Amino acid sequence: MMIRFLIAAFVSATLIAPACAETAELRLGVQRGMTYLPFIVMQHEHLVEQAAEKAGMPGLKVTFNVFSGGPAMTDGLLSDTIDVAATGIPSFVALWAKGKGKLAVKGLASYGTLPIALVTRNPNVHTLADFTDKDRIATPGVKTSTQSIFLRMAAEKMYGLAQVDHFDSITVGRGHPDAMAALLGNTEINSHFAIPPYLQIELRTPGVHVVTTSEEIVGGAVSNGTIFLTVRFADANPKVVAALYAALKVSVALINADPKRAAVDYLAVSEERSAPAEIEALIKIPGTVYDVAPHGILTMAKFLHRTGMVAIEPQDWKEMYLPLVWGESGS
């Protein structure tokens, strides 16, 4: 009953576009892990389909396509194999800054902030300064993933702007499941900038310890990622996009109100071999926040511009996002 009420409320609040012929299928690009819990809940509870039906579009087909990292997802968006991408801020900002015409993109929302930490099994590494060229740090994408950018931001603080690439040579691209397997499998990858639940699993392993966290590097919370899409798709499908945004808000509300149900949804979709109570505990970890407001977007965008990774410097986070989310307390 609560879900039906929330869907009706969010749809009526966001869906003001006139009726028109829109896409019959919405193709979403996502990744694995607790970062993407709002999408997993949307998938298992069929929230987008319900929101679309409330908006007068019954039968919308929604597919969730799993990618290993941001670059592949961006390629999927540009090649029209997916309609909406949900990935790290750097991939979004880079595409936003250079996108024109058919390539122009805008953000729709974020989907929360989770504890993100750099861990290692190297007993000699206790700070970032202890890493040597013999170490290997796994992130979802070298120079492109949020975690890789955190390392570059740390390098700027430690060594100055001219050496932002200090850690790039020891960074390797791996999706989080593969990175965890490599870290725990005694391979050359001995460190991982990890997200839940991989972070918690790794820290249960003797000898694996935290080196630093994203909050220590940035000085505040940064959204784990953002949802973005082409302006062309948004203009052609305003009701579908509004239904997606409404479904995301319902998903976030469900997670916050009923973490036990969200944990069951997560396990049903991910097929991970964990107890529901374990996943529920991860949802309740201090520092874990599921919301739609983009956090730290402007800080990261300005860093990317300062280091020459993007040509355009935004002055307000709203420049990069659709009006649907402007009412949230973003940054």
Image (tube, rainbow, N blue to C red):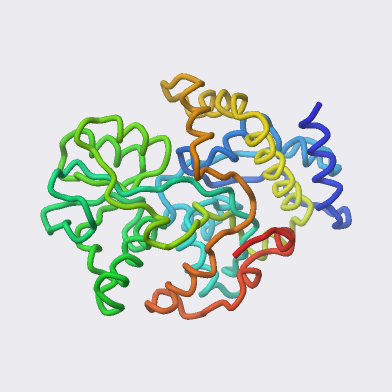
Q: Is residue 78 left or right of residue 256?
A: left
The residue drawn where x is 53% and y is 34% is 284
Question: What quarter of the picture does the N terminus occupy?
Answer: top right
Rendered residue at 23%/68% (across/down): 166
**Viewer-proximal residue among 232 and 122:** 122
The quadrant in which the C terminus is found is bottom right
Q: For residue 127, which quarter of the picture?
A: bottom left
Quarter occupied by residue 153: bottom left
Q: Nearer the viewer, residue 179 or 280?
A: 280
Q: Position of residue 310 (x, y in %)?
A: 45, 75
Q: Residue 12: image x %, image y %?
A: 86, 47
From this view, report whether residue 60 is shown above or below residue 322: above
The residue nearer to you, when weighing 43 against 281, is: 281
Relative to 315, residue 82 above or below:
above
At x 17%, y 50%, the residue is: 125
Task: Please state the horizontal and vertical placement of residue 262, each as a whole percent of the image.
Answer: 60, 29
Q: Taking 68 as reference, is 93 left or right?
A: right
Number of marks in the rendered image:
0
**What is the residue that sits farthest to the right in this orientation?**
18
Spot occupied by residue 327 in the image (x, y as percentages of width and height): 74, 61
Residue depicted at x 34% and y 31%: 201
Whether 278 is drawn above or below 127: the answer is above
